[in-house]
Amino acid sequence: MSQPGGGLGVTAIYTSQVARWGGLAHASLYDGGPGRVVFWLTSLFVGLGRLVQPGVPSLAVSILHRQVLFDRILERLGAQAVMELAAGLSRRGVLLSDDPRVQVVELDVPEVVKLKEELLARSPQGRAVLERGNLRRVGLDLGDPRLDDAALAAQAPPGSPLVVTAEGLCMYLSASAQRALWSRVQALLAARGGGSFVFDLVPAVEQAPPGRVGRLLGRLMAAFTGGQGFVRDERGRADIVEELRGLGFSSVEAIEPRLVAEEWALPRPRERSQQVVFLARVERGLQSV
Ligand SMILES: C[S@@+](CC[C@H](N)C(=O)[O-])C[C@H]1O[C@@H](n2cnc3c(N)ncnc32)[C@H](O)[C@@H]1O
């Protein structure tokens, strides 16, 4: 990976607000500060964009579907050890570590980890979360050239099956940076005797080209993230699956939340969303989802 993560903190604020808006458990722990302003401003621009491009699915519903689908996949995998890469202000770590047998590591750039801890420190419930022995936060830039496979593996929680997640990250990485990350995760899971990797990525070729308001939103996002925005390339879903298999993942599934919304009991199941969640496994008797 080559991109630094620092500027993307604002995107973590937005996605954590989606969890609050969607009424997901523990999301209120991370509410506050500029969060609601970021959420409503983004919703306003996306709403304007949908007026001129009515076919485009709701961003908030898309992210809500994605968040809950990740939760459901982890449940079905019976994950006992979870490492969330680019965890942002996600409340999933709190949800998972409600079970004291589950070990969780949340990794993000140091500034975002600091913000997360400050938000938790505001309430008695948050302070109790900070005290949990089975939930650890790690401030680390995944784009740091000094970070090698061993350094990442050293942060992984003990226990099995190990599941690594990267939610809301890959769309900001170039194809080569994605490949470097996927390869590192594969090496980690192989070294641990197997496990699963869950991440999302809507191939650019499946997305409607941004309209005028979408381009304006893109420019605003770049202004807030220090120039970082979505990276587009020509690979389709099948290319991504093939690439993951080429890196040593033994099976790869691409799951679209909108197609399984009823079956997986996602919130707002009748509302349209656009997401693709990849579940890539390194073999070792994991139960099927
Ligand atoms: C859209 S947010 C997603 C947060 C969370 N996973 C969620 O879905 O709610 C993207 C996150 O990726 C993190 N990130 C981006 N590049 C990173 C890097 N190089 N190292 C660590 N974290 C990174 C950002 O700091 C931000 O928290």
Image: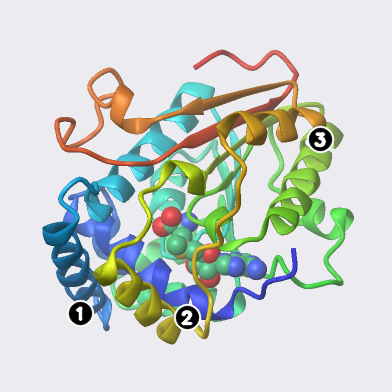
Does residue 117 appear to the left or right of 148 in the view shown?
left
Of discs 1 and 2, which sits in the foreground? 2
| Frontmost residue, 265 versus 104 | 265
Write the residue at 39% across / 30% down: 256
* Residue count near mark 1 (Cα–Cα under 10 Å), binned few <14, some 14–19, many ≥20: some
Does residue 106 appear to the left or right of 225 in the view shown?
right
- Residue at the far left in the pictured view: 51
Does residue 188 appear to the left or right of 251 in the view shown?
right
**Three-letter amino acid code at disc 1?**
Val
Write the residue at 61% across / 28% down: 238
Query: Along the polypeptide, which appears first: circle 3 or circle 2?
Result: 2
Q: Mark 1 — residue?
A: 37
Write the residue at 42% across / 86% down: 223
For the residues labelled 3 and 1, say whether their Cβ atoms are less than 8 Å apart.
Answer: no
**Three-letter amino acid code at disc 2?**
Thr
Q: Which picture quadrant has residue 231?
A: bottom right
- Give me the disc on residue 72: none
Write the residue at 46% across / 29% down: 73
